[in-house]
Image (cartoon, helix red, strand yellow):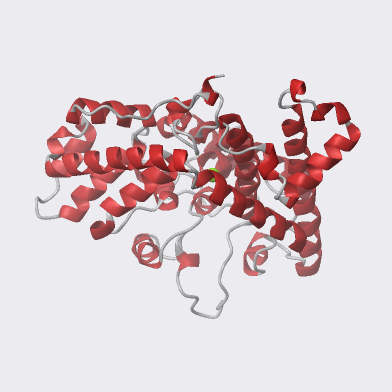
Amino acid sequence: MTLAPFACDPVRTRGRRFAEATAPTRTDYQRDRDRIVHSSAFRRLVYKTQVFLNHEGDLFRTRLTHSLEVAQLGRSVARTLALNEDLVEAIALAHDLGHTPFGHAGQDALNDCMAAYGGFEHNLQSLRVVDELEERYPDFNGLNLSFETREGILKHCSASNAQALEAREPGGVAQRFLPPSGPDALRLQPSLEAQLCNLADEIAYNAHDIDDGVRSGLITLEQLREVELFESFRLETLAQHPQLGDAAQGRRLLYDTIRRMLSAQVYDVIAATQQELARAAPGDAHQARLAGPLLRFSVDMRRQSSALKRFLYQNLYRHPQVVQTTDQAKQVVRDLFELFLNDPKMLQAGFAARALALPAADRAAQARVVADYIAGMTDRFATREHQRLTGKAFGGEPLKSALI
Ligand code: MG
């Protein structure tokens, strides 16, 4: 299909860090997507927590199913706006590759452990996975992805890490996180495709966390009535299908409400963005980057989506039962970090070799190897390693409701 002039065109890509011949039948972004799908980090997403720990039930979202939902939503919007669907898919499938085991709890714990050594940021880690940590090619580390895919993966970056990245790759993916300078004294946005993935991420997790939250029994349909975005569509569903008010109908009311919510948000993003694009009229992808954020919700939908986020934060992510299991998960990460940093020989062979090749005095570099190793673990691998090395069993009991 024909791309809009402001879409990223693979013919005009800023290219890969290591030059490669083009593929005979695939564009660079299709190739990026394929490399991501075949990576080891991608396969590990299936055993990584989104909100609920992986062992808590078989039907909850994992990082993998979350990433697939982000890709589906993103591609759907991209096709309507004539943006590059392949690039959106590549970014969406890679956006969470750097996540630790145990979701945000694992990330917070690893960030605490790394406080004296430069910290741990999951977006930056996703970039490290595709730039450095995958070992599949004879001539380079990482997957050697296109600039535009890497730019989309680095959604956030602290100023200090951006400086370090910029030193290695001047004018590269970290530039937009540095204070603006020079004649283009405007903060650069990422491509429209990357902006779209950020919104698709938010739409996806808001919706699936309601689904998983209700499935787990930690939040109820009754509680959700205070959320305007949910309640308005629940009432719409009930008006058209009054029989769904009957509990014997199971979760059909929930699913239909969520489906309507998703559609409304997708159509809202499309309409609001079309307006922005008509106003800014970017002539190409670079002009779109200079035009401020163009991918957006309407003002009203932004307000409603933020209210839903706040509800989920207060009622699900901070639920005592979630906090209790995540506290245990944090302990696993802290114990593993301490063990490996004190004795790098205990790391898996490749990581051990990397750590042992470093000067013993370079504690920060050694800590980074340990963080790379732990971040790559799945929930169950981290739990098993912890048990093997400490003899302590991870006490997380499956949620009863989740077993149904
Ligand atoms: Mg995500």
Quadrant in the picture for the N terminus = top right
Percent across and percent down for residue 88 are 62, 44
Q: Name the outermost residue toward the bottom.
A: 183
Image position of 261 (left or right of 375): right
Name the quadrant containing residue 231.
top right
Q: Quadrant of residue 118?
A: bottom left
Q: Quadrant of the C terminus?
A: top right
Picture coordinates of residue 66, whole percent (x, y): 57, 36
- Viewer-side residue, 11 vs 69: 69
Numbered circles on residues, count: 0
Q: Residue at x 60, y 43 (%)?
A: 205
348 over 28 or under it: above or below: above
Q: Is any atom of residue 82 visible in this view? A: no
* Residue 336 vertical position relative to residue 388 in the rendered view, above or below: below
Image x and y of residue 170, in percent: 41, 65
Q: Is residue 102 left or right of residue 281?
A: left
Q: Is residue 307 left or right of residue 266?
A: left
The residue that appears at 12% across and 39% down in the rendered structure is: 343
Say whether residue 369 is left or right of residue 18: left
Q: In the rendering, at what x and y percent does residue 2 appear?
A: 77, 45
- Which of the four quarters of the rendered structure image does ligand 1 lie in? top right
The vertical placement of 336 against 116, above or below, is above
Q: Is residue 196 visible?
A: yes
Furthest residue to the right?
240
Q: Residue at x 75, y 43 (%)?
A: 261
